[in-house]
Amino acid sequence: MSDPAEALAQQVTERVVDIVLSALDINEIAALVDLNALLGRVDIDAVMKKVDLNALLGRVDLNVLLDQVDVNAIVARVDIEPLLDRIDVNDLVQRIDTDALVEHTDLGAVIARSSGGMASEALDAIRSQAVGLDQFVDRWVQRLLRRKHPAPPAPAALLTAPDLTAPDLIAPDPIAEAEQ
């Protein structure tokens, strides 16, 4: 074995260190350290030369990183005007295959829908004019026949519902009103 005095010295040293460490407050010691001065002594370039950035980036999970990115916020910060200024619209239009576009478009249906809509509107306008003309002729016929009560608004077979004969549904006679 070794010298008993050396073993005793070792035990005493360990005990003294334990007593000193238990008496010290680590937070107070850390508060006394000037971190700026300590970091000022560190050569960052030397530390960075020792770092293998490719190995570090290889350990980064980009999917987790991209899940945290708000793409809408990034796009909102992009100024689109300079991008649009760089686009040649004429070149873009020349790239369109118009034959394929026409081939996949049912022009007959488009024309039928648009002309059908116009025809329907024209027919509605003609019907509206015909109804107005019919009412005008009816008023003059009633006047020529010297009838005091206006004719029913519909044929007798259609007048089964009581609200069809209501006075507010019968159109006023503008000629009779003009005479009064």
Image (cartoon, rainbow, N blue to C red):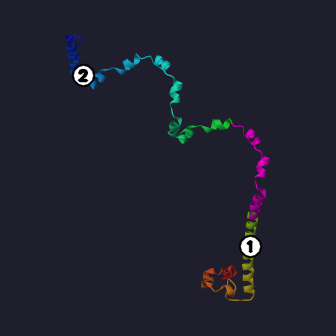
The location of residue 102, given as percent across then percent down, is 78, 51
Amino acid tagged 1:
Arg
Q: Which mark is residue 6?
A: none
Number of other residues with Cα within 10 Å of mark 2, as a class: few under 14, some 14 to 19, many 20 or more: few
Q: Nearer the viewer, residue 159 or 25?
A: 25
Q: Which residue occupies 19% across, 11% down?
A: 5
The amino acid type, in three-letter code, at marker 2 is Leu
Nearer the N terminus, badge 1 or badge 2? Answer: 2
Quadrant of res 11: top left
In reply to whether residue 101 is colored magenta, the answer given is yes
Determine the residue located farthest toward the right in the rendered image: 99
List x then y, in percent, for residue 159: 65, 85
Count how many numbered circles sit on residues in the image: 2
Measured as percent of width and height from the top left, residue 76 is found at: 56, 40
The label shown at residue 127 is: 1
Q: Within the image, what quadrant is residue 142 found in? A: bottom right
Depth-wise, is mark 1 or mark 2 nearer the camera?
Answer: 2
**Residue placed furthest toward the front:** 1
What is the quadrant of residue 157 in the picture?
Answer: bottom right
Q: Which residues are magenta?
A: 87-116
The front one of 34 and 115 is 34
Mark 1, Cα crowd under 10 Å, few <14 / some 14-19 / many 20+, is few
At mark 2, the secondary structure is helix
Looking at the image, which residue is at 66% across and 38% down?
A: 84
Residue 138 drawn above or below residue 76: below
**Which residue is located at x 28 percent, y 22 percent?**
29
Q: Name the side, left or right, on which 14 lies relative to 149.
A: left
Residue at numbered disc 2: 21
Mark 1 near mark 2, Cβ–Cβ under 8 Å? Answer: no
Asked whether 111 falls inside the magenta stretch, the response is yes
Query: Does residue 150 appear anywhere in the picture?
Result: no
